[in-house]
Image: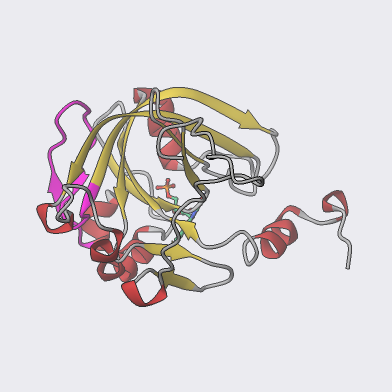
Amino acid sequence: MRITLADLQPSQRHAWLTPLIVPRPIALVSTVSAGGVGNLAPFSFFAMGGQNPQSIAFCPVADRDGNPKDTLRNVLETGEFVINVVSRSMIERVNQASAPYPFEVDEFDAAGFTRVPSTVVTPPRVGESLAQLECEVFQIVPHGSGPQHSTWVIGEVLVLHVDDSLIAEDGLPDTTRLHPAARLGRQEWAYVTAQNMLILPRPTTVPGGKPAPRRTMGL
Ligand SMILES: Cc1cc2nc3c(=O)[nH]c(=O)nc-3n(C[C@H](O)[C@H](O)[C@H](O)COP(=O)(O)O)c2cc1C
Protein backbone atom coordinates (compact mmCIF):
# COMPACT_ATOMS: atom_id res chain seq x y z
CA MET A 1 0.00 0.00 0.00
CA ARG A 2 1.35 3.43 -0.94
CA ILE A 3 -0.29 6.62 0.30
CA THR A 4 0.39 10.11 -0.98
CA LEU A 5 -0.31 12.47 1.91
CA ALA A 6 -1.60 15.22 -0.39
CA ASP A 7 -4.50 12.91 -1.40
CA LEU A 8 -5.74 12.69 2.22
CA GLN A 9 -7.78 15.12 4.29
CA PRO A 10 -5.83 16.48 7.30
CA SER A 11 -7.81 14.33 9.76
CA GLN A 12 -7.09 11.22 7.65
CA ARG A 13 -3.35 11.99 7.71
CA HIS A 14 -3.57 12.06 11.50
CA ALA A 15 -5.47 8.74 11.52
CA TRP A 16 -2.85 7.05 9.35
CA LEU A 17 0.25 8.38 11.07
CA THR A 18 -0.59 8.35 14.78
CA PRO A 19 -0.87 4.53 15.03
CA LEU A 20 2.56 4.28 13.37
CA ILE A 21 4.69 7.01 14.96
CA VAL A 22 4.64 5.40 18.40
CA PRO A 23 5.04 5.37 21.32
CA ARG A 24 4.91 9.16 21.69
CA PRO A 25 5.90 10.61 25.08
CA ILE A 26 3.44 13.10 26.51
CA ALA A 27 4.28 16.65 27.54
CA LEU A 28 1.70 17.95 29.99
CA VAL A 29 2.27 21.64 29.33
CA SER A 30 1.40 24.32 31.87
CA THR A 31 1.18 27.95 30.77
CA VAL A 32 -0.31 31.22 32.02
CA SER A 33 -1.84 33.94 29.86
CA ALA A 34 -0.60 37.54 29.99
CA GLY A 35 -3.78 38.23 32.02
CA GLY A 36 -2.89 35.53 34.56
CA VAL A 37 -5.25 32.70 33.50
CA GLY A 38 -3.62 29.29 33.93
CA ASN A 39 -3.79 26.43 31.43
CA LEU A 40 -2.78 22.79 31.31
CA ALA A 41 -2.91 20.51 28.23
CA PRO A 42 -1.21 17.31 26.99
CA PHE A 43 0.83 17.17 23.76
CA SER A 44 2.22 13.96 22.26
CA PHE A 45 3.76 15.75 19.29
CA PHE A 46 6.74 16.22 21.58
CA ALA A 47 10.50 15.63 21.43
CA MET A 48 13.81 16.61 23.02
CA GLY A 49 16.91 17.46 21.04
CA GLY A 50 20.49 18.54 21.49
CA GLN A 51 22.40 19.19 24.66
CA ASN A 52 24.08 22.55 24.31
CA PRO A 53 21.69 24.12 25.09
CA GLN A 54 19.03 21.52 25.83
CA SER A 55 16.12 22.02 23.47
CA ILE A 56 12.64 20.63 23.61
CA ALA A 57 9.76 20.94 21.11
CA PHE A 58 6.04 20.34 21.04
CA CYS A 59 3.41 21.03 18.44
CA PRO A 60 -0.05 22.50 19.10
CA VAL A 61 -2.28 21.91 16.07
CA ALA A 62 -4.77 24.63 15.13
CA ASP A 63 -8.49 23.85 15.17
CA ARG A 64 -10.70 23.37 12.09
CA ASP A 65 -11.00 27.14 11.71
CA GLY A 66 -7.24 27.63 11.99
CA ASN A 67 -7.47 29.09 15.53
CA PRO A 68 -4.61 28.43 17.99
CA LYS A 69 -4.94 26.28 21.10
CA ASP A 70 -4.92 28.13 24.43
CA THR A 71 -1.44 26.76 25.16
CA LEU A 72 0.02 28.35 22.02
CA ARG A 73 -1.80 31.60 22.69
CA ASN A 74 -0.22 31.76 26.16
CA VAL A 75 3.25 30.79 24.96
CA LEU A 76 3.10 33.50 22.28
CA GLU A 77 2.08 36.05 24.93
CA THR A 78 4.58 35.13 27.64
CA GLY A 79 7.41 33.05 26.12
CA GLU A 80 7.29 30.60 29.05
CA PHE A 81 5.99 27.10 29.75
CA VAL A 82 6.54 24.08 31.99
CA ILE A 83 6.65 20.51 30.69
CA ASN A 84 5.39 18.03 33.26
CA VAL A 85 6.37 14.42 32.59
CA VAL A 86 3.39 12.03 32.68
CA SER A 87 3.44 8.79 34.70
CA ARG A 88 0.92 5.93 34.60
CA SER A 89 -0.91 7.21 37.72
CA MET A 90 -1.68 10.52 35.95
CA ILE A 91 -3.14 9.19 32.68
CA GLU A 92 -6.86 9.54 33.47
CA ARG A 93 -6.46 13.13 34.75
CA VAL A 94 -4.24 14.04 31.80
CA ASN A 95 -6.96 12.79 29.49
CA GLN A 96 -9.45 14.95 31.38
CA ALA A 97 -7.16 17.99 30.95
CA SER A 98 -7.35 17.50 27.16
CA ALA A 99 -11.08 18.36 27.08
CA PRO A 100 -11.83 21.59 25.18
CA TYR A 101 -12.36 23.83 28.22
CA PRO A 102 -13.02 27.53 27.60
CA PHE A 103 -10.02 29.86 27.81
CA GLU A 104 -11.14 31.12 31.25
CA VAL A 105 -11.07 27.62 32.81
CA ASP A 106 -7.79 26.52 34.40
CA GLU A 107 -7.41 22.78 33.73
CA PHE A 108 -5.40 22.34 36.96
CA ASP A 109 -8.72 22.57 38.81
CA ALA A 110 -10.81 20.84 36.12
CA ALA A 111 -8.53 17.77 36.03
CA GLY A 112 -7.62 17.72 39.73
CA PHE A 113 -3.90 18.46 39.61
CA THR A 114 -1.93 20.37 42.27
CA ARG A 115 -0.14 23.66 41.45
CA VAL A 116 3.45 23.96 42.69
CA PRO A 117 5.26 27.28 42.11
CA SER A 118 8.06 27.25 39.55
CA THR A 119 11.43 28.85 40.29
CA VAL A 120 12.38 30.81 37.14
CA VAL A 121 9.14 30.94 35.08
CA THR A 122 5.60 32.02 35.96
CA PRO A 123 3.54 28.91 34.98
CA PRO A 124 3.21 26.53 37.95
CA ARG A 125 4.39 22.93 37.91
CA VAL A 126 2.14 19.89 38.35
CA GLY A 127 2.76 18.49 41.85
CA GLU A 128 1.74 14.95 40.83
CA SER A 129 4.38 14.85 38.06
CA LEU A 130 7.68 13.24 39.13
CA ALA A 131 9.75 15.38 36.73
CA GLN A 132 9.07 18.94 35.57
CA LEU A 133 11.00 21.14 33.14
CA GLU A 134 10.87 24.93 33.41
CA CYS A 135 11.32 26.25 29.85
CA GLU A 136 11.56 29.46 27.87
CA VAL A 137 10.72 29.82 24.19
CA PHE A 138 13.64 29.66 21.76
CA GLN A 139 11.64 29.86 18.53
CA ILE A 140 8.08 29.40 17.31
CA VAL A 141 7.81 27.89 13.83
CA PRO A 142 4.43 27.77 12.04
CA HIS A 143 4.11 25.03 9.40
CA GLY A 144 1.13 25.78 7.17
CA SER A 145 -1.53 28.39 7.85
CA GLY A 146 -5.01 26.93 7.33
CA PRO A 147 -7.23 24.58 9.35
CA GLN A 148 -5.28 22.15 11.55
CA HIS A 149 -1.89 23.60 10.63
CA SER A 150 1.05 22.95 12.95
CA THR A 151 3.04 25.36 15.05
CA TRP A 152 6.25 24.00 16.53
CA VAL A 153 7.16 25.54 19.86
CA ILE A 154 10.89 25.06 20.39
CA GLY A 155 12.00 25.75 23.93
CA GLU A 156 15.13 25.74 26.02
CA VAL A 157 15.08 23.85 29.31
CA LEU A 158 16.24 26.17 32.10
CA VAL A 159 15.54 24.13 35.25
CA LEU A 160 14.74 20.46 35.83
CA HIS A 161 12.96 19.20 38.97
CA VAL A 162 13.14 15.46 39.69
CA ASP A 163 11.42 13.65 42.55
CA ASP A 164 13.88 11.92 44.90
CA SER A 165 11.99 8.63 44.45
CA LEU A 166 13.28 8.41 40.87
CA ILE A 167 16.97 8.66 41.67
CA ALA A 168 18.92 5.40 41.33
CA GLU A 169 22.16 4.32 42.99
CA ASP A 170 24.21 6.05 40.25
CA GLY A 171 22.60 9.39 41.17
CA LEU A 172 20.56 9.66 37.94
CA PRO A 173 16.83 9.14 37.21
CA ASP A 174 15.71 5.54 36.69
CA THR A 175 13.03 5.23 33.97
CA THR A 176 11.57 2.06 35.51
CA ARG A 177 10.61 4.07 38.63
CA LEU A 178 8.92 6.75 36.49
CA HIS A 179 6.40 4.45 34.76
CA PRO A 180 6.29 6.99 31.89
CA ALA A 181 3.11 7.17 29.82
CA ALA A 182 2.95 7.36 26.05
CA ARG A 183 0.28 7.92 23.43
CA LEU A 184 -0.33 5.43 20.63
CA GLY A 185 -3.00 5.65 17.90
CA ARG A 186 -6.78 5.99 18.32
CA GLN A 187 -7.56 5.98 22.06
CA GLU A 188 -4.62 3.79 23.00
CA TRP A 189 -2.07 4.64 25.68
CA ALA A 190 1.00 2.75 26.89
CA TYR A 191 3.42 2.95 29.79
CA VAL A 192 6.90 1.62 30.44
CA THR A 193 7.71 -0.87 33.20
CA ALA A 194 10.86 -2.88 33.94
CA GLN A 195 9.13 -5.88 32.31
CA ASN A 196 8.79 -4.30 28.87
CA MET A 197 12.20 -2.61 28.81
CA LEU A 198 15.14 -3.97 26.80
CA ILE A 199 18.67 -3.04 27.92
CA LEU A 200 21.27 -3.00 25.15
CA PRO A 201 24.78 -1.50 25.45
CA ARG A 202 25.97 0.56 22.46
CA PRO A 203 28.52 -1.18 20.17
CA THR A 204 32.10 -0.46 21.18
CA THR A 205 33.67 -1.52 17.89
CA VAL A 206 33.04 -0.84 14.18
CA PRO A 207 33.42 -3.49 11.41
CA GLY A 208 37.09 -4.58 11.31
CA GLY A 209 37.29 -4.60 15.11
CA LYS A 210 38.40 -0.97 15.52
CA PRO A 211 37.05 0.92 18.54
CA ALA A 212 33.89 2.90 17.66
CA PRO A 213 34.54 6.66 17.80
CA ARG A 214 32.36 8.55 20.31
CA ARG A 215 31.18 11.64 18.45
CA THR A 216 28.60 12.94 20.90
CA MET A 217 28.56 12.52 24.65
CA GLY A 218 25.86 10.06 25.69
CA LEU A 219 24.37 9.57 22.20
C1 LIG B 1 -2.45 12.26 25.22
C2 LIG B 1 -2.86 13.42 24.38
C3 LIG B 1 -1.95 13.99 23.52
C4 LIG B 1 -2.29 15.10 22.75
N1 LIG B 1 -1.37 15.64 21.91
C5 LIG B 1 -1.66 16.75 21.20
C6 LIG B 1 -0.68 17.37 20.37
O1 LIG B 1 0.47 16.94 20.28
N2 LIG B 1 -1.04 18.49 19.67
C7 LIG B 1 -2.29 19.03 19.79
O2 LIG B 1 -2.55 20.05 19.15
N3 LIG B 1 -3.24 18.47 20.58
C8 LIG B 1 -2.94 17.36 21.29
N4 LIG B 1 -3.89 16.80 22.11
C9 LIG B 1 -5.18 17.48 22.28
C10 LIG B 1 -5.03 18.69 23.23
O3 LIG B 1 -4.56 18.27 24.49
C11 LIG B 1 -6.39 19.36 23.38
O4 LIG B 1 -6.78 19.92 22.15
C12 LIG B 1 -6.42 20.40 24.46
O5 LIG B 1 -7.78 20.81 24.68
C13 LIG B 1 -5.64 21.66 24.12
O6 LIG B 1 -5.77 22.52 25.22
P1 LIG B 1 -5.55 24.07 25.20
O7 LIG B 1 -6.50 24.67 24.17
O8 LIG B 1 -5.89 24.45 26.58
O9 LIG B 1 -4.12 24.34 24.85
C14 LIG B 1 -3.60 15.65 22.85
C15 LIG B 1 -4.54 15.05 23.72
C16 LIG B 1 -4.17 13.94 24.46
C17 LIG B 1 -5.18 13.32 25.38
Please give left or right for residue 133 compared with residue 146 in the image. left
Magenta highlight: main SS: loop
Q: Nearer the viewer, residue 96 or 101?
A: 96
Picture quarter containing residue 20? bottom right
Q: Residue at x 49, y 22 (%)?
A: 139
The question of residue 189 being in magenta is answered with no
Residue interval drawn in magenta? 112-131
Along the viewing direction, whichever of 62 and 173 lies nearer the viewer: 173
Image side of residue 95 versus residue 206, left or right:
left
Q: Is residue 26 left or right of residue 143?
A: left
x, y (%) of residue 205? 55, 46
Locate residue 35 relative to residue 102 in the image: left or right.
left
Residue 217 vertical position relative to residue 105 in the rendered view, above or below: above
Q: Is residue 115 magenta?
A: yes
Picture residue at 61% right of the left edge, 30% below the top = 142
Q: Please, which residue is most extreme toward the front here?
A: 209
Q: Quadrant of the N terminus?
A: bottom right
Which one is in front, 174 or 117? 174
- Location of residue 188 with respect to 15 vertically, above or below: below
Q: Is residue 21 above or below residue 74?
A: below
> How far across and how far down the image is residue 183, in percent?
48, 64
Image coordinates for residue 99, horizontal then vertical, percent: 41, 60
